[in-house]
Image (cartoon, helix red, strand yellow):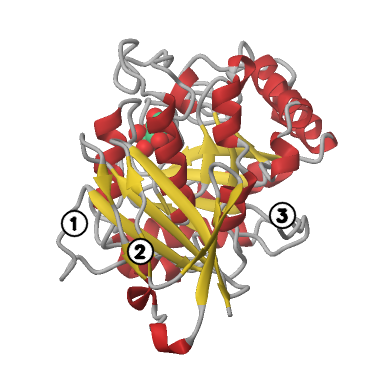
Amino acid sequence: MKEMDANKPLGLTPALGWNSWNTFTWDINEELIRNVADLFVTDGYKDAGYEYIVIDDCWSLKERDADGNLVADPAKFPSGMKALADYIHAKGLKFGMYSCVGTHTCAGYPGSFEHEFQDAALFAEWGVDFLKYDYCFKPRHISGELMYKRMSLALKNSGRDILFSACNWGEDKVYDWIRESGAHTYRSTVDIRDFWDSIKDLAISQLDKTPFTGPFSYNDLDMLVVGMNGGSNDAFIGSKIGGCTDIEYRTHFALWALMGSPLMIGCDIRNASEATKDILLNRDLIAINQDIEGRGAYRIKPEPNWFHNDEVFILVKVLTDGDLAIGFFNLSDTPREVPVLFWDLGLPHAAGFSLSLYDCIEHAELGSFKERFAPVVPAHDCRVVRAKLVR
Ligand code: GLA
């Protein structure tokens, strides 16, 4: 496996990190963020490649100051954002913040409309490395496309490398214009929620969107709910009774990894179980997600293979070194055999190769296979293999 390169260009591969929203929504403060930074180092997240620690909505006061600047809420962030950024940077990590194209953020705090260049300058001054840019309260008379072009230009000229993470929920034909805007990554889905049907619906909604993702402009399927176990303080996201099984969370992580989404942890990593850590720190899946060519995964065409439908499918990602990452997903409620014919991968039998398969979840070699591989996948589960051509 290749080591992560800390100096690679901004947005070359999907962002890896943590975001405060899914679990904490409005209930954020500097101690929490510092704790997350500490745990990134001590619990192995940093070593696995996670780098961005992002504060989502609800970090500011409800009004700008007399100069029109955003003000960090002193009750939540008494040391200020610059000090927090310094703390995060001292650990070799990167700091992310949140704003919105509109007059207000989705939670009603000041948005960046008509303050784009001023806010970008302030973020740069604070040492921000990542900006998530939401879509609420968008002025009706200006296109979303122009709004994202504006902030992109402001960030690129702020004097600091700031990864631009657009968040317009896949609306307004975003696929047609986002790459040109300069955004490094863009939400291509509605908001995720911490239960199985949400994960399943988001994944299925992206099956025909894989050609759009790629270096410097990745489809973002939303932050991970892995390990939340119904633990959000927001009823809409988590609804305390929500949550998924660890197998469902594992399938969620594998889908996001293979589909080239940013992997932004959304759980409370202060209480992460061993099962949660196993999922989030799966280096074989992270390596597939971070493959340097950043190709979208293709879906084996549903026809004429009778077993394929929107709930049972195979995704294949062509990797830089010639290997194939193959995900066998069974989102249905009963166990299914999910066979792949190597012919459908572009490997005719006459070419004389077998595929040597490595299981990226069990971290084990499976041996060499000719012509086909047909795992039986339990309900809501998946298999992901890395396939190498061998004579
Ligand atoms: C929107 C975004 C979420 C989150 C909230 C914050 O719903 O899609 O990811 O940032 O706003 O209010």
- Rendered location of residue 37, percent (x, y): 72, 28
- Rendered location of residue 374, percent (x, y): 34, 57
Q: Quadrant of ligand 1?
A: top left
Neighbours of disc 2 within 10 Å: few (<14), some (14-19), many (20+):
some
State the mark number for residue 210.
Answer: 2
Earlier-in-chain disc, 2 versus 1: 2
Q: Is mark 3 within 8 Å of ligand 1?
A: no
Which residue is the extreme one toward the right? 90
Earlier-in-chain disc, 3 versus 2: 3
Q: Nearer the viewer, residue 319 or 49?
A: 319
Residue corresponding to mark 3: 160
Kind of residue at badge 3: Arg
Q: In the rendered structure, are the residues bearing label 1 and label 3 in contact, judged by CB atoms less than 8 Å apart?
A: no
| Quarter of the view holding residue 235 | top left
Neighbours of disc 3 within 10 Å: few (<14), some (14-19), many (20+):
some
- Rendered location of residue 102, percent (x, y): 36, 42
Question: Which residue is rendered at x = 51% and y = 80% of the image?
Answer: 353
Find numbered disc 3 in the image and state the secondary structure of the residue it sits on: loop
Kind of residue at badge 2: Thr
Residue corresponding to mark 1: 307
Kind of residue at badge 1: Phe
Find numbered disc 1 in the image and state the secondary structure of the residue it sits on: loop
State the mark number for residue 272.
Answer: none
| Quarter of the view holding residue 334 | top left
- Rendered location of residue 132, percent (x, y): 50, 43
Earlier-in-chain disc, 1 versus 3: 3
Q: Nearer the viewer, mark 2 or mark 1?
A: 1
Question: Which residue is rendered at x = 21% and y = 34% of the image?
Answer: 333
